[in-house]
Image (cartoon, rainbow, N blue to C red):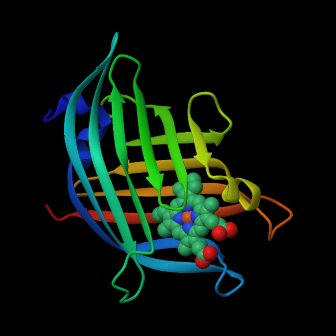
Amino acid sequence: MANEEWGPLAGLIGEWEGQGGLDHSFHHADDEVGDTTYLEKVSFKPFGPVVNGAQTLYGLDYKTAMWRGDETDPFHTEIGYWLWDAATGEVMRCFSIPRGIVVIAGGTAAADAKSFTLKAANGDATYAIGEGTYLHAHASSITYEVTVTIGDGEWSYEEMSMLKMDEFPDLFPHSDRCTLTKVG
Ligand code: HEM
């Protein structure tokens, strides 16, 4: 198998684009919940090994951006790393969203898995969500979960962030999904 050091992340290496993204979130400008379709461009660049004592990781340096309609500036971006620990079968996704949010989500997968799920929770000792004081008080990310499915020349994700927001008495389900095809 090519790039087997990267385990289940090997199939993500490259440049990807998807037109059919769908975001479900609360839009303050309209004061209502809305669904937004988006164009997404993702880049994954392999690196490794990274050694932490007895632990050896192989990773992907990633960045992604999403645009709605014909806007020039993306309305959502992420930068971070996806990591694979072959010894424990752990997959980790560490990323930052420029709202003052950092996430490290984790889960386990077989080395040849074509689908896996990663989770993080606010306050968890390992796979956790960090946020600034404003968001903590008014729109706190309580849990995050993403399921990734890798196909031939395409991959997709479905993710859900449960937010504790001023606007709703119950947790608000903020979700995103996209299917991306290989462009490089
Ligand atoms: C594809 C990924 C994502 C997209 C496209 C996206 C998009 C959006 C959009 C459109 C808004 C509404 C902004 C507004 O009009 O007020 C929003 C708000 C927000 N999102 Fe996301 N988001 C994504 C992922 C995430 C993730 C992973 C988290 C947390 C783990 C998150 C946490 C938040 C928070 C805390 C807000 C602010 C809510 C507020 O202002 O009250 N988002 N996002």
Query: Which residue is pictured at 52% across the width and 45% down the height?
Result: 103
Q: Quadrant of ligand 1?
A: bottom right
Question: Which one is in front, 89 or 62?
Answer: 62
Residue 113 image point, x, y percent? 35, 36
Report the side of 1 relative to 147 (left or right): left
Examine the rendered structure and indicate whether residue 45 appears above or below residue 27: above
139 displayed left or right of 147: right
Report the front residue among 48 and 146: 48
From the viewer's side, name the closer residue of 70 and 97. Answer: 97
View extreme (right): residue = 169
Residue 59 appears anywhere in the view: yes
Picture coordinates of residue 52, whole percent (x, y):
34, 17
Closer to us: 79 or 117: 79
Q: Is residue 155 above or below residue 118?
A: below
Compared to residue 9, the image places residue 24 above or below, namely below
Q: Quadrant of the N terminus?
A: top left
- Kindly give the residue lying farthest to the front in the view shown: 133
Q: Residue at x 59, y 43 (%)?
A: 129
Tell me the quarter of the image containing the C terminus. Answer: bottom left
Left or right: residue 73 compared with residue 26? left
The image quarter in which residue 11 lies: top left
* Vertical side of 157 occupied by 33: above or below: below
Q: Could you say where residue 81 lies in the image, as x and y percent from the top left?
A: 35, 42
- Dividing the picture into quadrants, the one containing residue 2 is top left
